[in-house]
Image (spheres, rainbow, N blue to C red):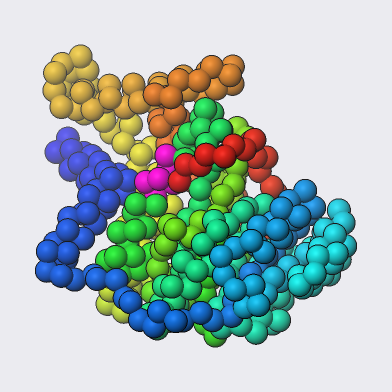
Amino acid sequence: MEALKIIFWIALFIIFYSYLGYGILLFVIIKIRRLFGLGKPFTGNEDYEPEVTLFVAAYNEKDYLDEKVSNSKSLNYPQNKVTQLWVTDGSDDGTPELLKKHKDVSVIHSPERAGKIAAMNRGMKYVKTPIVIFSDGNTNLGKNSIKEIVRLFRNPKVGCVSGEKRIYSKDADSAAGAGEGMYWKYESQLKKWDAELYSVVGAAGELFAIRTELWQEVEKDTLLDDFMISLRVAMKGNTIQYNPDAYAIENASANVKEELKRKIRISAGGIQSVVRLAPLLNFFKYGTLSFQYISHRVLRWTLTPLLLLLLIPINLILALNEGLVSLGVFSFLFWGQVIFYAAALLGWFLENRQIRLKILFIPYYFFIMNLSVFLGFGRYLKGNQSVNWERAKRGGASAEVVA
């Protein structure tokens, strides 16, 4: 029984550390560094204003492209220094034809659909600017996004800059919208602290940029192109920085079913990334970057969801041993788990009936996140996760956004 208690407390600590403890530790470290005057922002050459390429790998985006092109042309950056490059491989809804009607937009098209990363590998051969900025065809960028991204590249150690993903708030009334919005708020804060400590561990595909010279082709079956591209830039000794003032806005998933579909793919890609980035687990070689990578990403995609599942039977055995209805710590924690998962189940039940209680969004979304890891791991093992994105249905939009 003592051995079981040790396993229980280790598992509980890892779970807590993965979701909250790492954030608390980061907060403390950052505060201490600031006390000693460390981590001050790099200023550099304020006149730095290089040419950039806005790169969009798009598949059947005709419903969004006019708005996207217009948004890109309205950004607060000298337009004579901005090249719009769209790769529309496989699109058969008229996307390439409609894009060619827009002046100053370069279009690369092949009738074969080989996946987003294949389109990126092909399109990067045409990029001539020192900075390339990737964004999705169905997202709009904040007016100062290019300027805010370029500002961080003044520091020669910065090889990649990640923008912020924001979610339109109208859909925050659904579990998918509220859960996704709250998750990204927390993630945004962690990224700020990660960047201040050393480096962000992975960029958001909705908006990120790299120095063109640091690009290297990624395997054609890669599921998380943004994550692999950015981490491999960091593994070369560069840092990934984060600027929430550079942001991309999109609608939340239309419902939790659509959000689960998206997260299963991300989870399968996460497992694939952990395998392919195995050298990054070497603390002796990568130091702080390894610490951040394992704490912020690896645990959530591998060990922590398994421990969450294992914790239930272990906790039950320990609670039964001390008395299931006693006031002991194990019985208290067991009933806490029961209440939490019951709240998640109730959230699912009510969401399917269009009855929404915001207090249930967090346990429901947390459950969906971890369920997606198991389902994604199954897809990865079977090798049946297509490299082609199956677009998740998105909800409606409103003017207000939540990060």
Q: Main secondary structure of the magenta part?
A: helix
Q: Position of residue 235 (x, y in %)?
A: 41, 77
Q: Is residue 186 left or right of residue 209?
A: left
Q: Is residue 81 left or right of residue 149?
A: right
The residues colored magenta run: 182-187
In the rendered image, the vertical position of residue 222 relative to residue 320, given as above or below: below
Q: Quadrant of residue 305?
A: top left
Q: Position of residue 45 (x, y in %)?
A: 39, 83
115 drawn magenta:
no
In the rendered image, the vertical position of residue 176 relative to residue 42, given as above or below: above
Please name whichever residue, 251 or 111, is drawn nearer the observer in this view of the structure: 251
Q: Quadrant of residue 94?
A: bottom right
x 42%, y 39%: residue: 182
Q: Position of residue 20 (x, y in %)?
A: 28, 45
Is residue 5 among the parts visible in the rendering? yes
184 drawn magenta:
yes
Is residue 252 among the parts visible in the rendering? no
x 45%, y 46%: residue: 403
x 51%, y 32%: residue: 172
Q: Is residue 40 left or right of residue 100?
A: left
Q: Is residue 20 left or right of residue 378?
A: left
x 34%, y 52%: residue: 189
Please name whichever residue, 62 or 346, is drawn nearer the observer in this view of the structure: 62
In the rendered image, the vertical position of residue 209 relative to residue 140, given as above or below: below
